[in-house]
């Protein structure tokens, strides 16, 4: 099966939350935002879940030091809840691809009219992640993709064994409730460490802000080989981030 190299990147609290119970998720320092944009620059597509699209309303456009011209914005939306009022559709930018498990012809027509390419890759509101990634690889030639959450999308991908790397920045906050980094809506998850993915630590670094930790892990037991043999970008990025921010500050003086 052809599929892109998949990197999950999220910024979490020390209790492993992406967002609080109210949906608040502003956790990143400016180094971490730069890290996110560098990662976007290294891949050919970025992916988010429908709830992140609706709650955060991101444009997903900003990339740093792009290694490729090719860049798509992908939304996984099982029941087609996204709409043309979102920045993804309102603001000009790279092609938006919606992957869905719904065949609602009227909703599909509306999203296509707003400029999106819509693919039905599943049924009854459930997206088949392997099929979704195959479409991205074969129809769009996407070799690498950055997944920016949220927790349901992250879980759905890791449970389908199609994730190659997990990168996370752990920030000095606690929410106590809210959305977990990986969230199974069926509330089953992996019963023990044996059923969960096998991960190998590749990088641990203190964020240049001095108050966060960034870690990068390689997933060892994926379902099948991705189109790229290795990561499109190094795991530890702090030195690069320091330089980018220093250069920016110098240029502003
Ligand atoms: N701190 C961070 O780095 C970070 C990053 C991103 C997001 N967030 C936060 O995370 C929260 C959202 O996370 P979330 O877990 O609630 O939602 P999410 O993962 O963004 O989106 C969930 C939705 O995606 C669709 N989806 C995902 N996997 C699917 C599958 N296999 N089949 C069909 N549909 C699938 C479904 O859409 P349908 O409901 O339409 O079926 C599902 O309800 C927000 O508060 C956001 O601010 C934080």
Image (cartoon, helix red, strand yellow):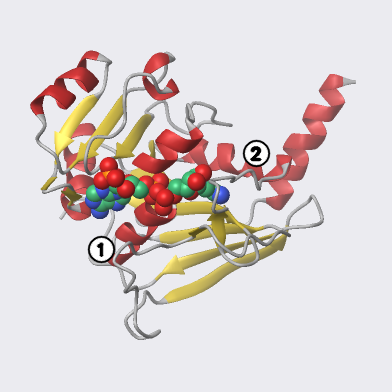
Tell whether label 1 touches label 2 (CB within 8 Å). no
Q: CA distance from mark 2 to mark 1?
A: 29 Å
User: Which of the two residues, 90 or 119, is positioned nearer the viewer here?
Assistant: 90
Q: Which residue is mark 1?
A: 160
Residue lying furthest front: 22
Q: Secondary structure at mark 1?
A: loop
- The answer to which image quadrant residue 46 occupies is top left
User: Which of the two residues, 140 or 130, is positioned nearer the viewer here?
Assistant: 130
Q: Is residue 239 left or right of residue 63?
A: right
- Is any atom of residue 89 visible in this view? yes
Q: Which residue is mark 2?
A: 34
Instruction: Establish if 209 lies above or below 97.
Output: below
User: Which of the two residues, 199 or 175, is positioned nearer the viewer here?
Assistant: 175
Question: Is label 1 within 8 A of ligand 1 (CB to nearest ligand atom)?
Answer: yes
- Residue 33, given in percent of the width and then of the height, sits at 64, 40
Determine the residue positioned at 76% across, 40% down: 243
């Amino acid at each position: 099966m052809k599929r892109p190299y998949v990197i999950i990147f999220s910024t979490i609290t020390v209790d492993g939350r992406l967002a609080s119970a109210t949906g608040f998720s502003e956790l990143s320092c400016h180094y971490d935002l730069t890290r996110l944009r560098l990662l976007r620059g290294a891949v050919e597509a970025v992916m988010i879940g429908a709830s992140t699209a609706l709650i955060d309303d991101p444009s997903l456009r900003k990339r740093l030091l792009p290694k490729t011209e090719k860049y798509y914005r992908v939304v996984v939306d099982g029941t087609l809840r996204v709409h043309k009022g979102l920045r993804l559709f309102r603001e000009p930018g790279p092609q938006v691809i919606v992957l869905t498990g719904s065949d609602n012809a009227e909703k599909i027509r509306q999203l296509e009219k707003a400029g999106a390419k819509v693919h039905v890759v599943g049924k009854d509101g459930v997206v088949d992640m392997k099929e979704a990634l195959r479409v991205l690889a074969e129809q769009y030639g996407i070799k690498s993709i950055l997944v920016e959450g949220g927790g349901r999308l992250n879980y759905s991908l890791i449970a389908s064994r199609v994730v190659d790397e997990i990168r996370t920045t752990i920030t000095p906050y606690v929410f106590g409730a809210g959305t977990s980094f990986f969230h199974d809506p069926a509330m089953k998850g992996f019963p023990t460490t044996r059923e969960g993915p096998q991960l190998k630590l590749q990088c641990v670094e203190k964020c240049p802000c001095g108050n966060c930790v960034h870690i990068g892990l390689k997933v060892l037991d994926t379902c099948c080989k991705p189109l790229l043999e290795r990561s499109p970008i190094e795991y530890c990025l702090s030195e690069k981030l320091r330089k980018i921010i220093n250069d920016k500050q110098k240029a502003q003086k």
